[in-house]
Amino acid sequence: MTSNEKVFRMLKALANENRLRIIQVLMTSQQPIHIEGLSRILEKDYSAVYRDVEALEKVGIVGIYIVGRSRVPYVKKKDELSKLFDFINSLI
């Protein structure tokens, strides 16, 4: 896979409102949040949040800690992602 394809897949994953909300919650939370907790916070079905987290993990935006039977997502490279969001907001 070329770097252009990787960028396209990452931007495609970020083009989903629910995924952006997941990232926002994870980046602003002071504590780890498992997927079930995310589904309650976002008022979305667990399976939908699970699929969105998997999509973000697949492109390398999110990592997953396994804690017992829970999957706890975290944002990789928070600083770089914050800079990307700041840049995008500057274009608006």
Image: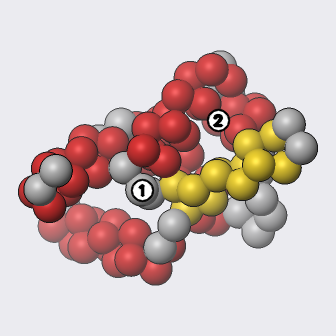
> Residue 14 in the image: x percent, y percent?
33, 47
> Residue 45 in the image: x percent, y percent?
65, 19
Left or right for 17, reference 46: left
In the image, which is nearer the foreground, mark 2 or mark 1?
1
Q: In this view, does 9 lie above or below 4?
A: above
Question: Disc 2 designates what residue?
Answer: 42
The figure's colour scheme reads secondary structure
Q: Distance between the residues labelled 2 and 1?
A: 22 Å
> Residue 78 in the image: x percent, y percent?
50, 73
Residue at position x 16%, y 67% in the image: 91
Residue type at numbered disc 2: Leu
Q: 58 or 43: which is nearer to us? A: 58
Instruction: Give the mark nearer the N terminus: 2 vs 1.
Output: 2
> Residue 79 in the image: x percent, y percent?
46, 80
Q: In this view, does 17 lie above or below 26?
A: above
Left or right for 86, reference 30: left
Q: In this view, does 54 lie above or below 43?
A: below
Left or right for 41, reference 8: right
Give the SS element for disc 2: helix
Residue type at numbered disc 1: Gly
Q: Is residue 53 above or below residue 46?
A: below
Residue at position x 52%, y 55% in the image: 62
Q: 10 or 6: which is nearer to us? A: 6
The 10 Å Cα crowd at callout 1, few under 14, some 14 to 19, many 20 or more, is some
Left or right for 11, reference 42: left
Quadrant the C terminus occupies:
bottom left
Question: Disc 1 designates what residue?
Answer: 60
Q: Is residue 36 visible?
A: yes
Residue at position x 81%, y 40% in the image: 70
Q: 61 or 31: which is nearer to us? A: 61
Residue at position x 44%, y 38% in the image: 55
Q: Is residue 24 visible?
A: no
